[in-house]
Image: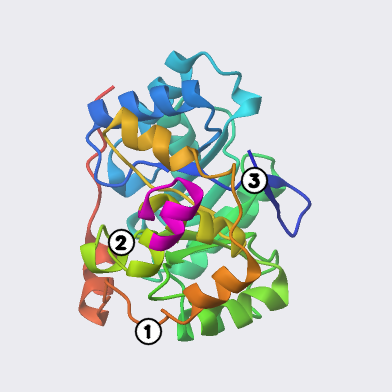
C-alpha cells in the first residue's frame, strides 16, 4: 500500500473501498472481502444507510481496528444534533473514526464543522474533512475553521482534475479524496485511446491506469464495487508507475467537465432530508 501524509502528520492509505450506492448486505460483503485482500481504507456515510453493515464487514474480516482507516460523513440533518458523532460511532460499532466529514455545504454547516472540531479534539476523529465544499463554499469555510480540515472529498477524474480547487487545498495541505474516480463509469472516459495504449504497455486495464493516475496525482481514491474481481483489480494498481511524460499526456484530457451538477435547490433538499438508518 502507498500512503498519503496529511497536514496533521496522520498517514492515510492511497486506495480504499467505497460503499456509495451499496445496500447493507452488499456493503458488508464488499468491505469484508476488500479488507481480506489487503485494503485498509473504508469509506461510508450517514446518507449511505449502511454504516452498521460496514462495521459488521470490518469485524467479519478479522482485521485489527488499528489497521483500518475508517472514514464516514455526517449528513446535513445531523449538523445541529449534539449526539450525531456518538450515534455515528454506535452504528459503526467503533470508539473513533479515522476521518470524519461533513457531507454537504447545506443546512447549518457551520454547526456541523464545529462538531467535527470537537470530535477531533476529543480523539473521536483522528482527522476531519469537508465533502463537496467547492468554490464559494470553501471560501466561506476559510477563516471560520479553528482546525483546518485534512481532506476534501470531491468529484475528480481525468476529465475534471479540480485544478482551481487544488490551488486552495494546497495552501493548507488539504488532500483530495476522489469520488466518481472513473467518471461514473463513463465509457467515453474509460475508452480514451490513451488509457488503452498505456494499459497495453503496463499489462493493466484502462480503469486501472486511471486509478493509478489518481494516486500519482496525490489523490486518495475510493472506487466501490459489488464484484470481488473488480475490488481486487482496483487494488492491483501499485505495481507500476506512469512516467512524467505519460502524466502530462493524461493532463491534456482535462476538459473541466464534471458528471454531477449540484443545484441550490438540491442543497435545500439535502438539509431537509433525514437518512433512515438500517436496523440493528
Nearer to us in this view, 108 or 148 = 148
The kind of secondary structure the magenta stretch mainly shows is helix
Residue 190, disc: 2
What's the distance in space between the residues labelled 2 and 3, CA to CA?
26 Å
Looking at the picture, how far across and down is residue 84, in whole percent? 44, 45
Secondary structure, mark 1, is loop
* Viewer-side residue, 201 vs 191: 201
Q: Which of the two discs, 2 and 3, labels the residue nearer the N terminus?
A: 3
Vertical order, 31 against 273 (above or below)? above
Q: Which residues are magenta?
A: 197-206
Above or below residue 237? Residue 59 is above
Q: Are marks 1 and 3 in contact (CB under 8 Å)?
A: no
Q: In front of the other: label 1 or label 3?
A: 1
Say the numbered circle drawn on residue 19.
Answer: none
| Quadrant, the N terminus | top right
Q: Which label is found at residue 12? A: 3
Of the image marks 1 and 3, the number of the one nearer the N terminus:
3
Contact between labelled residues 3 and 2, with CB atoms less than 8 Å apart: no
Give the mark, 2 or 1, whose residue is nearer the N terminus: 2
Placement of 112 over or under 158, stated as above or below: above
Image spot of residue 255 (x, y percent): 37, 84
The outermost residue toward the right is: 9
Q: Provide the secondary structure element on which disc 3 rests.
A: strand
Residue underneath mark 1: 255
Q: Look at the image and tell me whether residue 166 can be seen.
A: yes
How is the protein colored in the picture?
rainbow
Amino acid at each position: 500500500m502507498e500512503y498519503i501524509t496529511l497536514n496533521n502528520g496522520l498517514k492515510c492509505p492511497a486506495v480504499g473501498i467505497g460503499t456509495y450506492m451499496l445496500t447493507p448486505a452488499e456493503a458488508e460483503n464488499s468491505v469484508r472481502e476488500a479488507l481480506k485482500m489487503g485494503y485498509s481504507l473504508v469509506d461510508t456515510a450517514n446518507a449511505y444507510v449502511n454504516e452498521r453493515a460496514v462495521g459488521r464487514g470490518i469485524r467479519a474480516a478479522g482485521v485489527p481496528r488499528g489497521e483500518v482507516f475508517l472514514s464516514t460523513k455526517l449528513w446535513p440533518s445531523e449538523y445541529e444534533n449534539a449526539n450525531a458523532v456518538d450515534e455515528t460511532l454506535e452504528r459503526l460499532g467503533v470508539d473513533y473514526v479515522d476521518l470524519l466529514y461533513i457531507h454537504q455545504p447545506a443546512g447549518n454547516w457551520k454547526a456541523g464543522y464545529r462538531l467535527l472540531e470537537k470530535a477531533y479534539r476529543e480523539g473521536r476523529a483522528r482527522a476531519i474533512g469537508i465533502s463537496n465544499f467547492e468554490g464559494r463554499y470553501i471560501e466561506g469555510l476559510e477563516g471560520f475553521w479553528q482546525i483546518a480540515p485534512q481532506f476534501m472529498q470531491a468529484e475528480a477524474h481525468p476529465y475534471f482534475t479540480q485544478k482551481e480547487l487544488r490551488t486552495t487545498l494546497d495552501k493548507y495541505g488539504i488532500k483530495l479524496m476522489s469520488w466518481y474516480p472513473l467518471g461514473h463509469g463513463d465509457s467515453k472516459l474509460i475508452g480514451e485511446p490513451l488509457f488503452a495504449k498505456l494499459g497495453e504497455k503496463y499489462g493493466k486495464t484502462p480503469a486501472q491506469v486511471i486509478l493509478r493516475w489518481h494516486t500519482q496525482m496525490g489523490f486518495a481514491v475510493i472506487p466501490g464495487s459489488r464484484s470481488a474481481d473488480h475490488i481486487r483489480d482496483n487494488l492491483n494498481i501499485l505495481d507500476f508507475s506512469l512516467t512524467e511524460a505519460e502524466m502530462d499526456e493524461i493532463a491534456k484530457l482535462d476538459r473541466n467537465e464534471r458528471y454531477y451538477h449540484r443545484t441550490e435547490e438540491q442543497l435545500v433538499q439535502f438539509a431537509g432530508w433525514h437518512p433512515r438508518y438500517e436496523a440493528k
